[in-house]
Amino acid sequence: PLTFEDYLLMPETTQPCEVVQGELRMTPAPLPDHQWIVKKIYDLLDPWVTRHKLGVVLFAPVDLIITRSPLQTRQPNVLFLSAERTGITGRSQLRKKKPTEITPNLIVEVLSPNDVRREKKLVFAKVGWSVLKQKLSKCFGFLQRKFRPPAYMASAID
């Protein structure tokens, strides 16, 4: 199995991949519809965060370490790092830190039909929330590391 130390020695890549229980999994690029939804979410978050100097909003691929042993990583579609907690307000501070060592304040994952929903829910319950792509977008929350049913429903992201 791939160890955390091995992972740190790997070259940078833009190929979508994740490590699950120490196994490197390469995945196909998301479909255009998926990326369109991700862009819309990013476009909603980033201007607000930037305008109010709240931190930074990033989009995949950025590895998020879930556990070091066994190694498990995910690449959430969108993540937010608050300036208050991380000290990151822009690129200059971001360059000084390894994103793998930073726990986001918020993650957004747009689930695709190929995603294993239960697995994603369990993994992201540790660090964030997800949006299910359907006719209605459901926002799921996690409170005190416990999954909560949809607390908010919005019309489809158009």
Image (cartoon, rainbow, N blue to C red):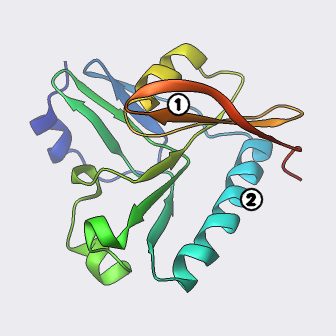
Residue appearing at x 57%, y 85% in the figure: 51
The reply to whether discs 2 and 1 touch (Cβ–Cβ < 8 Å) is no
**Mark 2 or mark 1, whichever is nearer to me:** 2
Query: What is the crowding at mark 1: few (fewer than 14 residues within 10 Å), some, or many (at least 20)?
Result: few
The N terminus - image quarter: top left
126 to 8, vertically: above or below: above
Q: To which quarter of the image does residue 46 belong? A: bottom right
Q: Look at the image and tell me whether residue 116 can be seen.
A: no
Please provide percent x and percent y for residue 125. 44, 29
81 to 88, vertically: above or below: above
Q: Nearer the viewer, residue 116 or 106?
A: 106
| The residue positioned farthest toward the left in the image shown | 5
Q: Nearer the viewer, residue 90 or 22?
A: 90
- Residue type at the position of mark 1: Thr
Which sits earlier in the primary sequence, circle 2 or circle 1? 1
Residue 27 marker: 1
Residue appearing at x 37%, y 53% in the figure: 104
Q: Secondary structure at mark 1?
A: loop
Q: Look at the image and tell me whether residue 8 can be seen.
A: yes
Please provide percent x and percent y for residue 52. 52, 83
Residue 124 marker: none
Please provide percent x and percent y for residue 10. 22, 44
- Residue type at the position of mark 2: Lys
Q: Nearer the viewer, residue 20 or 42?
A: 42
Residue 40 marker: 2
Q: Is residue 113 left or right of residue 62?
A: right
Q: CA distance from mark 2 to mark 1?
A: 22 Å
Please provide percent x and percent y for residue 68. 17, 31
Q: Is residue 35 left or right of residue 22?
A: right
93 to 25, vertically: above or below: below
